[in-house]
């Protein structure tokens, strides 16, 4: 148990960094854009969050709705740009509220689809503080009081206070996430207007209900939160580096050219392989260090992972990645 608690603490520190970056702009006017990324496939930006949609003669297939404000804005944009093409499907990458909220906006015309574990994970999330906000819950009472919602990051949380009682509960964070209506377990092909997208469960990295979207004709993969492009991870919990490696390999087996992530820049297939290699190098370097009797601090002071120095968040995340994986590998087997 001790090990679990310690790991959770480290993960919270790392994910707080993520969340600060991801949610920092919440208090400012949003940066939103729609960009074509090949054929009839488009990428949608809302600040640091991204989704995709595919236009077909019989309607539109949308990925994550992100949140109700984005969904409402997007619905208007789609009506102008693609008149008479309704959104027929919303394909959820996973249940996390900052990607999955807002599907209700499209539910009059769209079927909501997600992994078979989506609804169970959603129910769990509605009753416990999300791992990536855990560090803010200073008094560990499972909700956020005014004193815990300071700064830009806290401001993001504060706007989720639906009933205005000054406290944000997990249920309030998940108010706008609807359960999915149909599910899949390993793989499902959705066909509309002669075009297809596959939902693929790559494994349990980041979330048990993780789904990647594969657009075979456009040769594009949409993957959220567990597979960054030219970027170090913000932590592995609640999964392990081994889970992540397996889930990245599942994507590498697909035939595609472009990866469009839920955060950050678009990349090539080679970036997917480079990310898997980063995680493998991290694990191998720490295994070697542990065998040689080195401490976390000694490994952090050394030159491991130097070849990834050019990735923009290297300086910010490297030492935290080393500490987290060291803790995982050093812990006695359960
Ligand atoms: Zn997530
Ligand atoms: Zn995310």
Image (cartoon, helix red, strand yellow):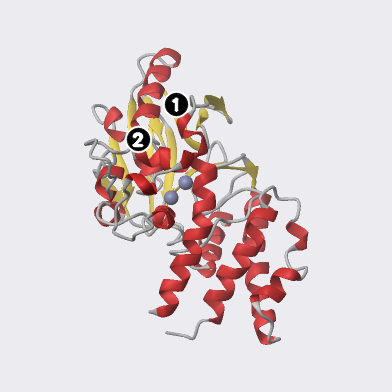
Q: Which mark is residue 306?
A: none
Q: Check the image and name the residue furthest to the front.
A: 147
Check the image and report above or below for 71 versus 322: above
Q: Position of residue 188 (x, y in %)?
A: 37, 49
Q: Is the C-beta separation of discs 2 and 1 under 8 Å?
A: no
- Horizontal and vertical percent position of residue 292: 71, 86
Quadrant housing the C terminus? bottom left
Which circle's residue, 2 or 1, is located before the other in the chain? 1
Provide the residue designation for mark 1: 55
Q: Nearer the viewer, residue 144 or 171?
A: 144
Q: Is residue 15 left or right of residue 83?
A: right
Q: Residues within 10 Å of mark 2 (few under 14, many from 20)?
A: some
Residue 186 shows up from this direction? yes
- Work out whether residue 139 or residue 51 is closer to the camera in this orientation and state it: 139
Q: In the image shown, does 115 or 127 lie closer to the viewer?
A: 127
- Give how far across and how far down residue 278 sits, in percent: 66, 62
């Amino acid at each position: 148990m001790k090990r679990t608690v310690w790991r959770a603490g480290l993960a919270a520190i790392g994910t707080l960094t993520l969340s600060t970056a991801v949610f920092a702009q919440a208090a400012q006017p949003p940066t939103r854009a729609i960009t074509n990324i090949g054929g009839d496939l488009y990428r949608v930006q809302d600040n640091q969050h991204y989704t995709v949609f595919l236009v077909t003669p019989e309607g539109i297939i949308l990925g994550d709705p992100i949140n109700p404000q984005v969904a409402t804005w997007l619905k208007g944009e789609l009506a102008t740009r693609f008149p008479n093409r309704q959104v027929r499907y919303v394909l959820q990458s996973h249940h996390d509220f900052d990607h999955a909220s807002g599907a209700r906006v499209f539910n009059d015309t769209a079927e909501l689809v997600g992994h078979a574990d989506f609804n169970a994970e959603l129910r769990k999330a509605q009753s416990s503080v999300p791992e990536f906000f855990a560090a803010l819950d200073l008094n560990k009472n499972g909700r956020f009081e005014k004193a815990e919602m300071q700064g830009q990051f806290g401001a993001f949380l504060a706007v989720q206070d639906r009933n205005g009682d000054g406290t944000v509960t997990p249920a309030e964070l998940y108010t706008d996430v609807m359960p999915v209506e149909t599910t899949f377990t390993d793989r499902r092909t959705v066909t509309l207007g002669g075009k297809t997208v596959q939902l693929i469960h790559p494994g349990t990295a980041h979330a048990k209900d993780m789904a990647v979207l594969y657009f075979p004709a456009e040769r594009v993969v949409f993957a959220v939160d567990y597979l960054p492009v030219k970027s170090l991870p913000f932590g592995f919990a609640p999964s392990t580096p081994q889970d992540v490696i397996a889930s990245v390999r599942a994507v590498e087996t697909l035939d595609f050219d472009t990866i469009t992530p839920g955060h950050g820049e678009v990349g090539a297939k080679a970036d997917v392989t480079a990310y898997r290699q980063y995680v493998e190098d991290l694990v191998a370097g720490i295994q070697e260090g542990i065998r040689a009797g080195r401490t976390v601090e000694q490994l952090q002071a050394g030159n491991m992972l130097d070849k990834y120095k050019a990735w923009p968040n290297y300086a910010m995340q490297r030492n935290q990645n080393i500490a987290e994986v060291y803790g995982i590998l050093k812990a006695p087997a359960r």
